[in-house]
Amino acid sequence: MLYYVIANMIVEIVLFRPAEGPNRDYTNFTMYISDKGIPQVNERLIIMLVFGFTHGVAYGLLHLFQQRDWISFPAVQLSTVAHVRSNLVRIGKKSTLFAGVVTSVFWIGYNIFWSSVAVRVVMKFIATDVLYHSSRHGPRWWSFGLAFRLFWNTLITTALLECVHAICDQFLSKTMDVTNTSVDPNACLISGLNVEGSNASPESILTYHAFQELHQLVGYSPPRRADIFNDVICVPSTWKQISTKCLQTMNKGASRIESLNPKAPGSAPASESVNGLTKKKLAPGKGGAVEMDIFNKTKPVRQSTSFVQEALNGVTDLLDNLKGASTEELLVQKRLAEEAAAGKTVDPTLRPVLTGPRKRPEVLAFSWLAKTIGDFISNWPWLQKQFSSSGPRPSPAVLCVMDDCQLVIWSFQSLARMVDASFREDKMGVVQKDIPAILESMVGLLTSLEKFVGSAQFQTAISSSEGAHALVGARSVAMIQALKTSIYQIVRTFKNHLGDFAIAPGTVERLRQFVELDD
């Protein structure tokens, strides 16, 4: 936002503030309105500066809402000049519409609300030598010349910034392995899909751009779908390259999820043997401290229900050891012992009554404080949850299970949309032969997700107070719902032809549920 405000103000200062000529009134905060040299606040300059700031904020909000800075991706690779020229009509229409809306809103708002406030601020802090301001010389509703100047400044500035955005988008797209003379959008798309990079590397943004473009064009661009279906000259074909990359992304996500699911009893690895002796893993707590560190990688679970309560109990036990006679009772007992040793007889009614061991005042005070703190924490479940240390902690691997959640969703949604559209648009039959592999991958991913959601690790992640673990649960549920929708989309279209495909029996049983749902 600050970048757009600064950029717009610089353009206003450099291009639209002439020092000489008929527009010199726009250069100073004070001007002289008569031959007598009466100083006057230059409201034309005030309105230009306020409008420049407003325009920068409005343009920044426009790009923030449209997210163009992050997801703009040119479909065709051209030279920079040709790319800007190809977008001139779009830039002109958008700049004209934006300039008209911003100028109209600002002109109405300034004349009603901002005019007097802006002039008073300038007279107080800048033009202190001006004693009055004559509203007769300020802008009015009928000052169409000034309004047109605002509109023209906005139009030129917006068009210039849009050209800068187009050049930046072109520069980003050139980092892909496509020549400048290439005009094949499918080659650009496949090149972006094949970019490898982690979530922390700059290359990952190209992969996200490519998957997002694929997701959008297969759903809302029939001409681009037709190009993919009809491109059978390339070896492998465009469809084959796209489907292979999407299936790889889905299978990678399924493998990552399956690695966290509990293994079947028969799938346990065989124990190793050395010199006829079998190495066995000792149970926790049976092999000493060293073996516990080796075999028990997770932090031992603490059995107390509350960290605060555990600390209070420890201090209470320490103070309980101080139980005994008070100082006064000790002095009385010492005096009685001395009298008995001296052979003195004292009237028993004059002796103090000894009640036996009692809690000292500091023990009573701390017990009251501990009870008060415990009651306070029990009344606030959120606070009690923060101090709680009981129960298993989620595994760090759970955080990585949904690293490429968005890419996986875009992959199977794009495949489902193209398979659904191929029933009507694929004249070459290049998609139908891959439908069994697509359905098996989708059903396999769905099965792995459902196992993960039903596992103890997922429940631990859901109940954890850490936001990252809770996000894993939300993403898992969202992916399951999106995956079921994509499978249902394919089954609904090819319901009468599923028997013609060679699909694994386990996948057929699961697909039958979607067929019954459609019936």
Image: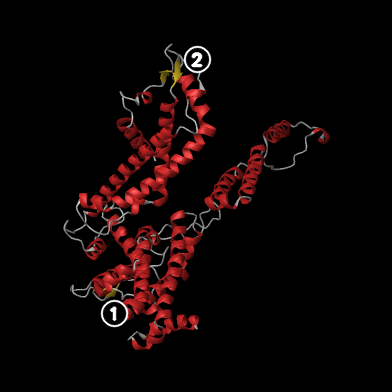
Question: Disc 2 or disc 1, which is closer to the eye?
Answer: 2
The image shows residue 398, relative to residue 237, as above or below, that is above
Q: Toward the viewer: 486 or 444?
A: 486
| Number of residues whose C-alpha sits closer than 10 Å to that of mark 1, classed few (under 14), some (14–19) or many (20 or more) | few
Q: Is any part of residue 440 visible from this angle?
A: no
What secondary structure is found at the residue carrying circle 2? loop
- Whole-percent x and y of residue 276? 25, 76
Q: Amino acid at mark 2?
A: Leu
Compared to 355, does 15 lie above or below?
above
Q: CB under 8 Å between callouts 2 and 1?
A: no
Compare marks 2 and 1 and give the one earlier in the sequence. Answer: 2
Question: Which residue is located at x 47 percent, y 67 percent?
Answer: 456
Instruction: Please tell me in which quadrant of the rendered image residue 335 appears.
Output: top right
Task: Give the structural element (helix, strand or loop) at label 1.
Answer: loop
Q: Please identify the quarter of the rendering in which residue 247 is found.
A: bottom left
Q: Residue extending furthest bottom?
A: 499
Residue at x-position 38% and y-position 37%: 5
Q: Residue at x 73, y 31 (%)?
A: 339
Is residue 131 visible in the rendered structure shown here?
yes
Q: What is the residue that sits farthest to the top in this orientation?
A: 36
Read off the residue under disc 2: 131
Q: Residue 50 in the image: x percent, y percent?
A: 43, 32
Identify the coloring: secondary structure
Q: Quadrant of the N terminus?
A: top left
Which amino acid, by three-letter code, is at mark 1?
Answer: Lys
Residue 224 position, x and y percent, is 30, 67
Q: Which residue is mark 1?
A: 427
Q: Around disc 2, counting alpha carbons within 10 Å, would you say few (fewer than 14), some (14 to 19), or many (20 or more)?
A: few
Observer-nearest of 219 and 340 = 219
- Asked where in the image residue 206 lies, by quadrant, the reply is bottom left
In the rendered structure, the answer to whether residue 485 lies left or right of residue 80 reads right
